[in-house]
Image (tube, rainbow, N blue to C red):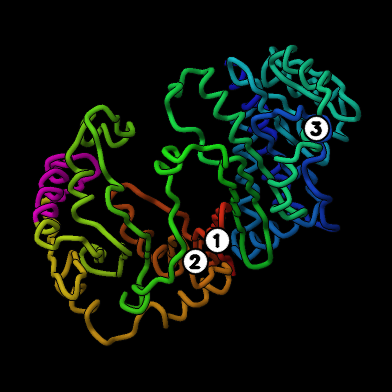
Amino acid sequence: MRARRIFAGVAVAATAVVVAGCGGMGSAGSSSLGGAASIAPANSVAFVALDSNVSSGQWGAVDGLLRTFPAHDDLLTQLRATFEQRSKLSWNDDVKPALGSELDLIALPGKEPQLVGLTQGGDRTKLDALLQKLDKGIVTAQIGDWTAFSSSTVALDDVKNATTKLADNNTYRAAVAKLAGDALVRAYANGTEAQQLLASLGKQSPDAAVVPFAWASAELVAAGDGVRVNGYSHDDSTQTAAQKFQHVPAAPYASSLVDEIPAGALFVADFPVTAGQFQFSPSDSLPVPLQKLFGTSSTLLTDLDNLLGGETALYVRPGLPIPEVTIVTQPNDVTQAESALADALKTLRAAVPAGGKGGLDLSSVPVFHKSAGGQFIISTSQQGIADFSSAGPKLSADPAFKGAQQASGMPAETTGFLYVNLASSLPLVQAFGPMVGLKLPADLGALKTLTAFGTRNGEDTTFSVFLEVR
């Protein structure tokens, strides 16, 4: 409950910053985020810093991106009105004067999560009033030139009395060295402290493998051509051989399927599948969303283990009356894969009966398959299988895909990638979405592509997501 209170306070302030920042013009670039690391305890589980200076270069970049949408002014007016209506707060009277140039959040170790928010440069009286409107249980304290707030006085004392600081912690320094100085948001997590917190909460048994990272960091950065999220992690070198075996990372590879997937794809997910990746034992529990579909245990994952292998791609192309969906994989045993496909389809169609919620009827979706040269091709149309095997234009030469590769900085070798042609797919969703209860705003023409990919070098893993806006 305490964590929820303080997190709600930070979330409201962050939402307000987004609404306000998109309406202002940035001037000078913001200084490096994370100043409160100089007072945060060295053993902090996590640390997040948000640029709340609405005149910074980063918020200017966001505003420039939003101005590519013709309805920019109307959208911001609507966002502010919605924020004030739902929060019962006035931006000009309650929020704006309370915010400083930076809003940070510290997660402290303990028997239950302890969160402390910090801001600098705002009106202390206005901040106190804002926090009391959000929750009367939130208290504040002055720590150096930062104002700290939390639902726990003990947490505030832990920050105030810390003798070693996060900014001087070598793990933290290594993690944030990967991050850009100018960003909207920067985040850090300590794998060892996170492991201990999970254990104290009873979320992990003593015999469970340790969190497979020593540290993780991430950033949200706005630029002239889009918005990027970068994530970084470093392996935990204290793992035993058995624990490392449970967390074998994917090795970078150069996709060969981009030279076979037809050009014009709306969506492509390309990833490696290793033997046993979908192994499932009766003692394991499926995630709640999957339990709702298949119950607490299922043979579906075993079917997937027999069906998929090697470099695998799922892609979507335009089609009528529904888009064409194709999967290409390289199973160890094609005959076993055919049997697994039949079993998986039976399970899925039983889990989503005809006439179910949303009008989804899997029994009416045709599924074709073909094996050739060690590849197993599954598609909702015969044409999809024919075009994959043809000599027609391929994804690797598709101008939209090549542009997304260049804009996102996706290297030749990745640990897997995702690509969405938003310029072509969003109009289709807008046209056919209402049939299944999905309605998107009319003016999304500035969104071009979405690209995500992973890379790995030694013990370091990187993950990037790039939304291209033109």
Q: Residue at x 26, y 87 (%)?
A: 391
Q: Residue at x 57, y 24 (%)?
A: 196
The tag earlier along the polypeptide, 3 or 2, is 3
Q: Does residue 459 appear to the left or right of 162 in the view shown?
A: left
Q: Does residue 284 appear to the left or right of 416 in the view shown?
A: left
Segment tinted magenta in the rendering: 339-362
Callout 1–callout 2 Cβ contact below 8 Å = yes
Q: Residue at x 59, y 35 (%)?
A: 191
Q: How far apart are the two marked residues, 1 and 3, measured between alpha carbons?
A: 29 Å
Q: Residues within 10 Å of mark 2 (few under 14, many from 20)?
A: many
The tag earlier along the polypeptide, 1 or 2, is 2
SS majority, magenta: helix
Q: Quadrant location of the N terminus? A: top right
Pointer 1 residue: 467
Q: How far apart are the two marked residues, 1 and 2, measured between alpha carbons?
A: 6 Å
Q: Amino acid at mark 3?
A: Thr
Q: Residues within 10 Å of mark 3 (few under 14, many from 20)?
A: many
Q: Quadrant location of the C terminus? A: bottom right
Q: Would you place residue 81 above or below residue 462 in this image?
A: above
Element at label 3: strand
Image spot of residue 233 (x, y percent): 58, 47
Image spot of residue 101 (x, y percent): 82, 41
Q: Which mark is residue 449?
A: 2
Q: Which mark is residue 119?
A: 3
- Pick the residue in front: 182 or 133: 182
The answer to whether residue 96 is seen in the rendering is: no
Q: Amino acid at mark 1?
A: Leu
